[in-house]
């Protein structure tokens, strides 16, 4: 999922198995008032769960499950600005770690609170359960 707008809301999605990042937020012009809430971001094969790139202002990442990605749970690239809030997310089994907010010359202002690391369920089992639930509605 590639986002580059203002006042965007990404809520209650299953984002899984992408070739690169699960969500990439691209701040060609400053990203303002973006909310990424209550998503399951798992098993993205070559990148991080969420990538923040370029200029940010007012991005809130909350109540997501970010597990089993090839990179970090959340990573930055040449990210500047302020107002990034990362709260109440669950991170597990991301190959490179939970977060890297200073990668690739990034200097973005951010605050984090209430996040947890752990393994709420085996990531493979969690993905299977999500697929079963999703298919049940078809």
Image (cartoon, grey):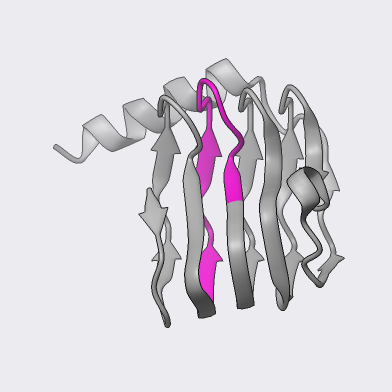
2 lies above or below 120: below
Residue 77 in view here: yes
Horizontal side, residue 32 vs residue 103: left or right: left
Quadrant in which residue 37 is drawn: bottom right
| Residue name at image x 48 percent, y 59 percent | 26
Q: Position of residue 55 (x, y in %)?
A: 60, 70
The answer to whether any part of residue 100 appears in the image is: no
**Quarter location, residue 134:** top left
Tell me which residue sits at (79%, 51%) in the image. 105
Which residue lies most toward the left here?
Answer: 138
Q: Residue at x 63, y 64 (%)?
A: 61
Task: Give whichever of 98, 56 is nearer the camera.
Answer: 56
At x 62%, y 45%, the residue is 65
Is residue 25 part of the magenta span, yes or no? Answer: no
Q: State which region is magenta.
A: 34-51
In the image shown, does 28 or 65 lie closer to the viewer? 28
Residue 75 percent coordinates (x, y): 70, 45
Residue 25: x and y in percent read 50, 58
Q: In the image, 75: left or right of 46?
A: right
Q: Is residue 43 left or right of residue 13?
A: right
Q: Quadrant of residue 79?
A: bottom right
Q: Nearer the viewer, residue 57 or 99?
A: 57
* Quadrant location of the C terminus in the rendered image: top left
Residue 44: in magenta span: yes
Work out whether 6 lies above or below 89. below
Image location of residue 82, percent across then percent down: 74, 78
């Amino acid at each position: 999922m590639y986002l580059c707008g203002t006042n965007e809301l990404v809520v209650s999605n299953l984002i899984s198995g992408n070739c690169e990042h699960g969500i990439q937020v691209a701040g060609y012009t400053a990203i303002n008032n973006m909310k990424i809430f209550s998503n399951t971001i798992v098993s993205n094969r070559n990148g991080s769960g969420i990538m923040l790139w370029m200029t940010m202002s007012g991005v809130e990442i909350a109540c997501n499950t970010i597990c089993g990605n090839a990179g970090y749970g959340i990573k930055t690239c040449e990210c500047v600005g302020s107002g990034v809030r990362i709260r109440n997310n669950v991170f597990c089994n991301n190959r490179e770690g939970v977060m890297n907010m200073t990668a690739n010359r990034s200097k973005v202002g951010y605050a984090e609170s209430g996040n947890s690391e752990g393994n709420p369920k085996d990531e493979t089992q969690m993905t299977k359960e999500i697929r079963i639930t999703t298919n049940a509605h078809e």
